[in-house]
Amino acid sequence: MTVAKIVANKTGSRIISCKPDENIESITKTLTKARVGVVMVVNDDGSLAGIVSERDIVRFIAREGKKALSQPASTIMTKKIVSCGLTDNVTSLMGVMTENRIRHLPIIVNDKLEGVISIGDVVKARIEAAEREAAEMMQYITSGV
């Protein structure tokens, strides 16, 4: 199964984003309201500048204390972005996420942010594929071929 197929079946595929100068307190409210684990940090030209995760925020607050909340996203965002494309498959996504210890991948098409795929999306797709394969195998076995 490819990223394109996962996205086509995904409900709620909007991109939650912020600007590099948005403060951490505002980002925490955005994450909470949207019920997501990451926010994409997007420049004025629409290009992806970085990613801020809940984990990034927690570690930053633990290190800096309350003053961390007034700092901009650009101070803690992950700038080395690992991404995927629409033609990437579930197996490769699992490897990339495991190797990089990440739970979200921005989907980049022609240098443009097109969406975000989470480990939950990948696991759901893999379970659906396994169930489909099992049903097809059972159908084959019971068809008397």
Image (cartoon, rainbow, N blue to C red):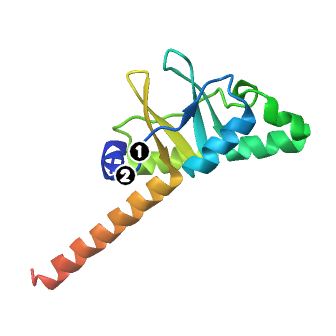
- According to the picture, the residue beneath numbered tag 1 turns out to be 13
- According to the picture, the residue beneath numbered tag 2 turns out to be 10
Q: Quadrant of residue 102?
A: top right
Q: Is residue 70 left or right of residue 65?
A: left
Callout 2: helix, strand or loop? loop
Q: In this view, does 46 lie to the left or right of 11?
A: right
Q: In which quarter of the image is residue 30?
A: top right
Count of numbered badges drawn on the protein: 2
Q: Which of 130 and 63 is in front in this view?
A: 63
Placement of 19 over or under 29, stated as above or below: above
**Residue 142 on image: x %, y %:** 16, 84
Q: In this view, does 129 lie to the left or right of 119?
A: left
Q: Say which amino acid is labelled 2.
A: Lys
Assign the C terminus to one quadrant of the image. bottom left
**Residue 128 on image: x %, y %:** 35, 64
Can the viewer see residue 27 in this picture? yes
Residues at circles 1 and 2 in contact by the CB criterion of under 8 Å: yes
Q: Is residue 46 left or right of residue 75?
A: left
Q: Which residue is drawn at 48% across and 20% down?
A: 46
**Residue 38 on image: x %, y %:** 60, 42
Callout 1: helix, strand or loop? loop
Q: Which residue is drawn at 87% across and 45% down?
A: 62
Placement of 140 over or under 36, stated as above or below: below
Q: Say which amino acid is labelled 1.
A: Ser
Placement of 76 over or under 46, stated as above or below: below
